[in-house]
């Protein structure tokens, strides 16, 4: 098998890997029987090195739907199925994903391994809370069935375990009942950071909430934002209109942009236009589920705007008790440095379930920052601030954190490592992330 350079969504790092693409479950046995260490890769939508390594096993051809119970909204599928394919099947029958990230082009296995969250974490938790059962091929070559009640330690260390506990073969999970493919949305303009954090509380009865935040604004409007909240629209909400939206048109970024395109000035201009387009303090409307949940999916290869050096998505969470002061402190450092980010997205998290999941009760902020020679030392400083505030960094978005930060900010890091050493003493499953963070 020849080696190729591969990279995940943020185009950093680029690593040489041998990639195989099993189609049948027994092909995974062959992978395990081979002596070299490997990591499973879904659709490469993580931002970093979680699904990179010298030997990579792609799950994308292992993507069959095994059962769909349209009465109770329960689906069983192979792990390489994309969430977009789940939606194609289930939406016409009135079922939506229980939790969805900001792109539908991830696999179900990737959703479990990163224990992804959506805009409804404060209400519905993360993806794993809706998983009924998993079938896993362990590093020792055994098939294990697990759930929150059966082999529960295996289950919980797999949810958010970044693919290190074994190959997730099949997933059974429950769906959310909906009447239409539209969202009843409210957009509220906030003049500053404290105001938007208060608005999150005020509107926390909404199932979905997310804020876009202008992280370059200084002075009295520091942290000005637009909070978007929503609910699935019912049939009466649509006043007799069509119940499923038309498919949206997608555009594509054809090549990597040169780095000067994304300088601080263009980010400031973008933010000013975006904020200005919400001319009223509160705007109500009906929008398609695609526009509400997946605005970025409308532009294929949008990651190319960051150029060939790639970018980092820096996503962290700060506990609620210190949320206001912590987010302000960290954003102040970012805005002083003028690190441009088109995308600065703030969300509210509810309580953490899985021992190794990223989520904890608090506020999470995600920033896209183009890579340059000074960025990583600056982010090392921010890591220390996040650690001081009792927060942590999202592994699936990480490409550069130091091992010490991981081990001192994830409270169950030691028991996770002990568990992995017990189930995989020969270190069959290894990723660039697990090596960098000294997880195994
Ligand atoms: C535009 C965009 C928006 C996003 N928004 C969000 C968001 O709102 N919330 C959020 O939580 N995340 C978000 N993400 C991140 C993304 O949801 C996760 O990184 C997800 O895990 C990617 O899944 P994937 O199938 O592409 O897997 P990959 O990126 O290829 O792999 C991710 C991890 O899953 C493991 N894995 C994949 N398949 C298996 C398997 N079958 N068995 C064992 N391990 C496996 C890999 O080893 C790796 O550790 C976003 C990403 C993008 C590009």
Image (tube, rainbow, N blue to C red):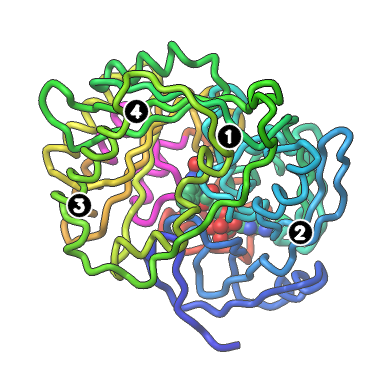
Residue beneath the point at 63% across and 70% down:
57
**3D distance between C-alphas at marks 3 and 4:** 30 Å
N-terminal of the pair, mark 3 or mark 4, is 4
Contact, mark 3 vs mark 4 (Cβ under 8 Å): no
Identify which residue, 364 or 241, lies in the foreground: 241
Residue beneath the point at 24% across and 45% down:
270
Contact, mark 1 vs mark 4 (Cβ under 8 Å): no
Taking 62 as reference, is 70 left or right? right
Mark 3 vs mark 4: give the one in front.
Answer: 4
Mark 2 vs mark 4: give the one in front.
Answer: 4
| Quadrant in which the N terminus appears | bottom right
**3D distance between C-alphas at marks 1 and 4:** 32 Å
**3D distance between C-alphas at marks 2 and 3:** 39 Å
N-terminal of the pair, mark 2 or mark 4, is 2
**3D distance between C-alphas at marks 2 and 4:** 44 Å
Label of residue 137 in the image:
2
Give x and y (percent) for residue 58.
63, 69
**3D distance between C-alphas at marks 3 and 1:** 29 Å
Crowd tier of the residue under label 4, counting other residues whose Cα lies within 10 Å: few below 14, some 14–19, many 20 or above: many
């Amino acid at each position: 098998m020849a080696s190729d350079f591969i990279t995940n969504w943020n185009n950093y790092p680029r690593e040489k890997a041998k990639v195989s693409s099993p189609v049948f479950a027994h092909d995974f046995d062959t992978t395990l029987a081979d002596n070299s260490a490997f990591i499973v890769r879904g659709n490469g939508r993580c931002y970093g090195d979680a699904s990179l390594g010298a030997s990579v096993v792609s799950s994308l051809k292992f993507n069959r739907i095994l059962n769909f119970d349209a009465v109770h909204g329960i689906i069983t599928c192979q792990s390489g199925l994309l969430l977009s394919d789940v939606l194609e099947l289930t939406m016409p029958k009135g079922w939506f994903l229980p939790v969805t990230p900001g792109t539908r082009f991830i696999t179900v296995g990737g959703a479990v391994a990163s224990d992804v969250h959506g805009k409804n974490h404060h209400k519905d938790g993360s993806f794993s809370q809706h998983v009924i059962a998993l079938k896993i091929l362990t590093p020792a070559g055994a098939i294990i069935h697990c759930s929150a009640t059966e082999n529960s330690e295996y289950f919980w260390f797999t949810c958010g375990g970044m693919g290190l506990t074994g190959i997730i073969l099949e997933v059974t999970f429950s769906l959310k009942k909906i009447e239409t493919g539209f969202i009843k949305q409210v957009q509220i303009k906030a003049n500053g950071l404290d105001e938007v954090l208060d608005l999150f509380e005020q509107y926390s009865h909404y199932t979905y909430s997310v804020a876009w935040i202008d992280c370059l604004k200084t002075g009295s409007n520091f942290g000005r934002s637009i909070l978007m909240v929503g609910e699935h629209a019912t049939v009466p909400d649509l006043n007799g209109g069509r119940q499923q939206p038309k498919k949206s048109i997608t555009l594509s970024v054809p090549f990597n942009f040169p780095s000067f395109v994304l300088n601080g000035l263009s980010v400031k201009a973008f933010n000013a236009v975006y904020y200005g387009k919400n001319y009223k303090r509160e705007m109500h409307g009906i929008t398609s589920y695609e526009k509400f949940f997946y605005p970025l999916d409308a532009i294929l290869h949008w990651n190319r705007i960051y150029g060939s050096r790639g970018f980092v998505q820096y996503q962290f969470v700060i506990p609620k008790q210190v949320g206001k002061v912590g987010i302000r402190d960290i954003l102040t450092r970012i805005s002083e440095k003028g690190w441009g980010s088109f995308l600065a997205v703030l969300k509210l998290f509810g309580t953490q379930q899985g021992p190794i999941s990223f989520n904890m009760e608090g506020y999470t902020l995600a920033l896209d920052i183009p890579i340059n020679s000074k960025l990583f030392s600056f982010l090392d400083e921010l890591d220390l601030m996040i650690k001081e505030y009792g927060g942590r960094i999202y592994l699936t978005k990480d490409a550069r954190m130091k091992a010490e930060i991981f081990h001192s900010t994830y409270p169950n890091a030691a028991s996770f490592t002990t568990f992995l050493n017990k189930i995989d003493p020969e270190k069959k499953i290894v990723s660039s992330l697990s090596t960098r963070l000294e997880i195994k």
